Image (cartoon, rainbow, N blue to C red):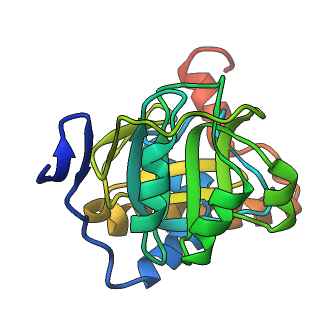
Amino acid sequence: MKREIVQGKIGFCIAGDFKRPTDLSILEKLKACGTPALSDGLNKFNTMHPRIKPVCDDTRIAGPALTVRLRPGDNLMLHKAIGLAEEGDVIVVDTGGCTNYCVMGDLMGSSAFKKGIAGIVIDGCIRDVQDLRDKKMPVFASGVVSCVGDKEGPGEINLPISCGGVPVLPGDYIVGDQNGLVVIAPEYAAAILEGAEKKLAYEEKRAIEIEQEIVVKADIDEKLRTLGIIK
């Protein structure tokens, strides 16, 4: 990826914009699959840490990542990122693991979703949780604290970050629901979607078997025989 700083300096900058998908149907298909099947399609990689949870249980998001890296305890560049975000984007925020200060509340969330973004993912704290829930904002965060941070910087927008223990590049597809969040490189999305759909087809077949009282799969005993546990 080209890492061209167009405004600012190293560590306190805005990089060039990223490529957004022209075919939005891929995002809808990824969202419909759900994160468990996608995680299987990703071979268990690129699944964010479970500390990052949705504010509303029925939240489902899918969209390209607008990445934000903040100095711990500061949210200046998140304000700017909200201004730069386009409809359908998912703002993904790396706070450096800060839990002493929140970086967003109701007013910032309202500003972001007024622009039609798809979601916000913060590896850090938020506040005004009841307001966010009442407005059904598709926000994921790793904590809640009432104390707000500074607006001094530094920080970076549209450069690689780490969120929930997963590398995130600008433009990566972020898919989230009540089971968690996954990160998908756009160039692999079709292959991962194919793997996820195969997993869903298998689960549908297995559900029918359970209804037919086949409660333990045949390959379980075969695995145990291979391991020498049963004969």
The front one of 99 and 29 is 99
Q: Going 42% across and 56% down the picture, which residue do you hit?
A: 80
Q: Is residue 100 left or right of residue 23?
A: right
> Looking at the image, which residue sits at the far top?
228
Q: Going 11% across and 53% down the picture, which residue do you hit?
A: 2
Q: Going 33% across and 77% down the picture, which residue do you hit?
A: 21
For the C terminus, give its image quadrant: top right
| Up-down relation of residue 100 to residue 63 (above or below) | above
Asked if residue 201 can be seen in this view, the reply is: no
Q: Is residue 214 left or right of residue 29?
A: right
- The spot of residue 167 in percent (x, y) is 36, 39
Residue 203 occupies which quadrant of the picture?
bottom right
- The spot of residue 187 in percent (x, y) is 25, 63
- The spot of residue 18 in percent (x, y) is 25, 65
Asked if residue 222 can be seen in this view, the reply is: yes
Q: Going 48% across and 50% down the picture, which residue do you hit?
A: 78
- The spot of residue 22 in percent (x, y) is 32, 84
The front one of 143 and 30 is 143
